């Protein structure tokens, strides 16, 4: 028996009518960039995340890159992130002119290991980008504590976990200076979450 890797038709079937209607509304209004549909999305997504603001951009890479630029990250700076992520996280750091520095992950979550974070900080470090992976947030309390201690910015990469709860509350992204999220679903395999060992 062949087991399908990913059945997108089955996921689309229950919402096909709603999706077609939404797409037709955009086409009929010729609102292909910006406009009322994007504004409505920004308000709804900000409310979903418990945030005051949401700015829609082209993709998660742009969101991280623009957050880095807004925080003044540039050449000669270092930004710490996790290696277990899509290339876009490090790519956005490079686009800003900074150097990505990788901190190893926790084996049970595949997220940044806060216990290994402090030893990666140098005088050039300006920010930390924890990646919320497989629908589960990174361990933000110790990450934020370390960031405060060293006066570093924190930008959450929530592209693979929008709305994920941290300790049963505060949907990700929400607890740092800036965050990125993506509405494009990502599936890395039949199970999008690794089993704890």
Image: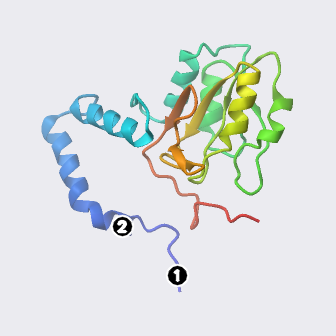
Give the x, y percent position of residue 74: 65, 14
Residue 58 image position (x, y, % from top left): 42, 32
Query: For the point 40% across and 30% down, which residue is it?
Result: 54
Mark carried by residue 2: 1
Which corner quadrant of the image does residue 149 belong to? top right
* Label 1 or label 2, whichever comes before in sequence order: 1
Judging by the rendered image, the residue that carries numbered circle 2 is: 9
> Image quadrant of residue 35?
top left
Which quarter of the picture shows residue 32?
Answer: top left
Badge 2: residue crowd in 10 Å (few <14, some 14–19, many ≥20): few
Which numbered circle lies on residue 52? none
Q: Which structural element holds mark 2?
A: helix
Q: Does residue 157 appear to the left or right of 22 in the view shown?
A: right
Closer to the camera, 32 or 14? 14
Q: Which one is in front in this view, the residue at disc 1 or the one at disc 2?
A: 2
Q: Examine the rendered structure and indicate whether residue 169 appears above or below residue 51.
A: below
Residue 188 drawn above or below residue 182:
below
Q: As drawn, which residue projects farthest toward the right?
A: 119
Question: Which residue lies at the image location 65% right of the left edge and 18% below the top edge?
Answer: 97
What residue is at 71 percent from the left and 26 percent from the top? 147
């Amino acid at each position: 028996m062949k087991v399908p890797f990913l059945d997108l038709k089955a996921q689309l079937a229950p919402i096909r009518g709603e999706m077609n209607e939404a797409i037709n509304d955009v086409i009929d209004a010729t609102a292909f960039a910006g406009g009322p549909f994007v504004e409505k999305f920004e308000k709804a997504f900000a409310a979903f995340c418990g945030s005051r603001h949401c700015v829609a951009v082209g993709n998660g890479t742009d969101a991280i890159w623009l957050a880095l630029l807004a925080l003044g990250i540039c050449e000669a700076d270092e930004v710490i992130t996790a290696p277990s992520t899509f290339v876009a996280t490090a790519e956005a750091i490079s686009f800003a002119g900074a150097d990505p520095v990788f901190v190893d992950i926790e084996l049970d979550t595949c997220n940044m290991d806060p216990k290994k974070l402090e030893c990666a900080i140098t005088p050039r470090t300006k920010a930390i980008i924890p990646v919320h992976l497989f629908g589960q947030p990174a361990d933000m309390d110790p990450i934020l504590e370390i960031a405060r201690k060293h006066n570093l910015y924190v930008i959450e990469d929530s592209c693979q976990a929008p709305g994920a709860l941290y300790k049963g509350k505060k949907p990700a992204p929400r607890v740092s200076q800036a965050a990125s999220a993506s509405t494009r679903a990502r599936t890395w395999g039949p199970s999008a979450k690794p089993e704890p060992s």
